[in-house]
Amino acid sequence: MTTLAVPLDDRSYDVHIATLSADEVAECIAAAVGKPSGVAVLVDEHVAEVSPRVAALIAALKARLPRVQMFRLPRGESAKNLAAVERTCQWLAQSGYDRGSVVIGVGGGAATDHTGFVAAIYLRGIAFALCPTTLLAAVDASVGGKTGVDIPAGKNLVGSFHQPRAVVADLGFFGTLPERELAAGMAEVVKAGLIADARLFAQLESDPGAALSAAFLPATIAAAVQVKIGVVCEDERESGRRAILNFGHTLGHAIEAASGYQLLHGEAVGLGMLGALALGEARGVTAAGLRSRTQALLARLALPVDVKTRISPEVVNRIEVDKKRHSDAVRFVFVARPGEAVLHDIPLKEVKAQLLAAV
């Protein structure tokens, strides 16, 4: 098992990565949460239906922790809204969970975001742990303490910073993932390489298929997670450098919303990265050719690369409600060269006009 420390003083925790038994997952979580008064396990309903590992995990948790109950969350992005959060909080209250309780989230990025946000606001904050079941959640959504849900105006506009007690990525859950979901997770790995790990990006370019093989997948996840840990520990609450983790997301969120969430988050982020690289090249920030290299890599990973058909005036207008907007400007993340990300505040009018021209 690979264990990575997230050193944040009294908010420190570990990220565990391996193919694990239910007992091993439960042991990691139990060791991290201590002696709670009760445990609420929030599980994506689709994961609960397709993976026998969920029932085994619940049984293993019951053997170690008190008052373990499971609550099913709506599938995928349907869990990322305030109505779903209210239902979960109402169930927690009716079930008698108090401030000594712990919430455990099991599922993809939407489920982990939902769990973290619920834990941050229920009774003004209780402890939580996460068991990500998708590649995207393992490499990105579950680590770093950013939690949030969507509202009609835009994605992740309501949220909080709240660090988990533990993250346990049991790769055994990945066996039920469609290939499309695995590919979507790789978009965040590519992002990690582009913004802060040139060696990782080079390895992906050399042999992208190897990164998803059983032999190398734990190391792939660990490399991406280590990038995020390094950035988060330098800037936990996104007052500066942590914003580089948003590379591809400003435009990606707009593309994702415009698709009616038919695109997976990772697919939209991949397209958003291509748009950001195109804009960076047009502004002289990004090294010539990096966009075409990244597009070739994403295509080899079976991710959509039709960014030109995805960028419309409607999509660009959605950037106005992005959470990274500052007054009449948006903080845009560019990659100068693999491993080197930079932040530029650009007037919204310039972003709109130049994006449409650049792609």
Image (cartoon, rainbow, N blue to C red):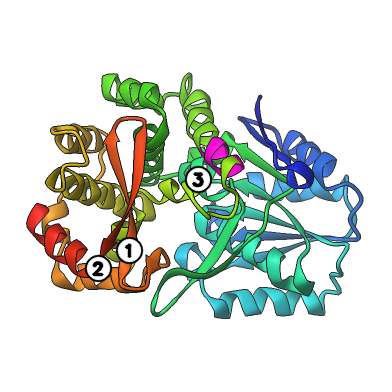
Question: What percent of the width, then of the height, locates residue 274?
Answer: 22, 46
137 or 327: nearer the viewer = 327
Q: Circle 3 is placed at which residue position?
A: 140
Report the amino acid beneath label 2: Leu
Q: Which secondary structure, mark 1?
A: strand
How many numbered marks are there? Answer: 3
Report the amino acid beneath label 1: Val
Rendering quarter of residue 92: bottom right
Q: Is residue 109 magenta?
A: no
Question: Is residue 217 placed above or below 260 in the rendered structure?
Answer: above
Q: Circle 1 is placed at which residue position?
A: 330
First of labels 3, 2 by sequence position: 3
Between marks 1 and 3, how big is the CA–CA gap?
A: 23 Å
Which dot marks residue 348? Answer: 2
353 or 140: nearer the viewer = 353
Decide if residue 201 is on the left or right side of residue 227.
Answer: left
Q: Which secondary structure, mark 3?
A: helix
- Residue density around tag 1, few if under 14, some if 14–19, many if 20 or more, within 10 Å: many
Decide if residue 181 is on the left or right side of residue 356.
Answer: right
Question: Is residue 262 placed above or below 292 in the rendered structure?
Answer: below
Question: What percent of the width, then of the height, locates residue 332?
Answer: 32, 55
Question: Is residue 200 placed above or below 224 in the rendered structure?
Answer: above
Question: What percent of the width, then of the height, locates residue 78?
Answer: 48, 70
Residue at (76, 42) in percent of width and height: 9
Question: What percent of the width, then of the height, locates residue 222?
Answer: 54, 29
Decide if residue 275 is on the left or right side of residue 256.
Answer: left
Q: Which quadrant holds the N terminus?
A: top right
- The residue stretch that appears in magenta: 228-233
Between marks 1 and 2, how big is the CA–CA gap?
A: 6 Å
Cβ atoms under marks 1 and 2 closer than 8 Å: yes
Per the picture, the main secondary structure of the magenta-coloured stretch is helix
Rendering quarter of residue 327: bottom left
